[in-house]
Image (cartoon, grey):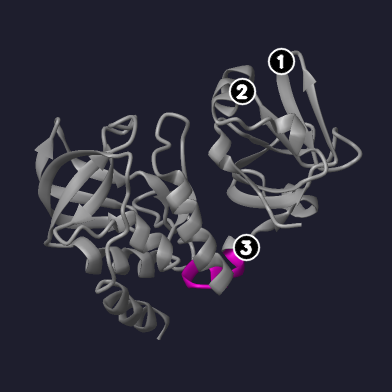
Amino acid sequence: MRIRCLLTFLVVVATAPALAAGGLEKGESARVRAVVDGDTVVLDHEIDGAAQVRLVGIQAPKLPLGRPDFPVWPLAEEAKQVLETLVLGKTVTLSYGGRRMDRHGRLLAHLHDDAGTWIQGELLRLGMARVYSFPDNRAVVSDMLALEGAARAAGTGIWGDPFYAVRGAGAAGGFTGTFQLVEGRVADAAKVRSRVYLNFGPDWRTDFTISIAPRAMRLFRKADLDPLALKGRRVRVRGWLRDYNGPLIEATHPEQIEVAAD
């Protein structure tokens, strides 16, 4: 029933005006001959030696894809079906906003169909993906965050499943080793040997922390965002949680951090 509702909604939004995704460099066109999962497709011919495209800027629910003991994430099959409805057998145009190939030999591109519909935007609007950006591929992230935020506020798609819930900073320690959105108030902000730390509790040895390396600070300065000024603000950060003096997310670019409503 859930996937039927999503596909019905998909038919409706497909008639809406295409979302403009400025800042991208238009590239080649090709037909999609297969969909691997909710954010990966295979083209009918190679471009720059690669036929597989990873839809850059998003992360859809994951399938095992041959990985032993890898659990299927909730709504992974539904996300794949939605992407199939959007692009399978259709001609798409690739556009680029940064690095063009990943370490697995897949093209990193945004996709648009013949009507100009932005495929990443549709997946985010339908709640079938989260924003997942990198410092060398940051084009149109602000547009994607807006679409994700609207879907999350409406509880659409993955945002109605607790698996994808925004975690409170106090609960982050229970999710190390996973990609999460974590929200809380910055209790303290400090620079230690050129590295910035945003601490979300009184004990930096155990409480959730955002860490920003000196090389990443250049991007923050260019974006006119001073992380030290976030002390006392409520923020939401996304990234992979690891355990280093408590749960920690390394922020490599400013789009990972959003100032949340107080």
**Quadrant in the picture for the C terminus:** bottom right
Q: Nearer the viewer, residue 239 or 110?
A: 110
Q: Position of residue 90 (x, y in %)?
A: 12, 60
Tell me which secondary structure the magenta stretch mostly adopts. helix
Q: Is residue 157 magenta?
A: yes
Mark 1, Cα crowd under 10 Å, few <14 / some 14-19 / many 20+, is few
Residue picked out by circle 1: 194
Residue at 68% x, 53% y is 260
Which mark is on residue 165? Answer: 3
- Residue tagged 2: 217
Asked if residue 36 lies left or right of residue 128, the reply is: left
**Residue 218 drawn above or below residue 259:** above
Q: Identify the secondary structure beneath mark 1.
A: loop
Q: Which residues are magenta?
A: 155-163
- Disc on the earlier residue, 3 or 2: 3
Q: How far is the residue under mark 1 from the one under mark 3?
A: 33 Å
Three-letter amino acid code at the position of disc 2: Met
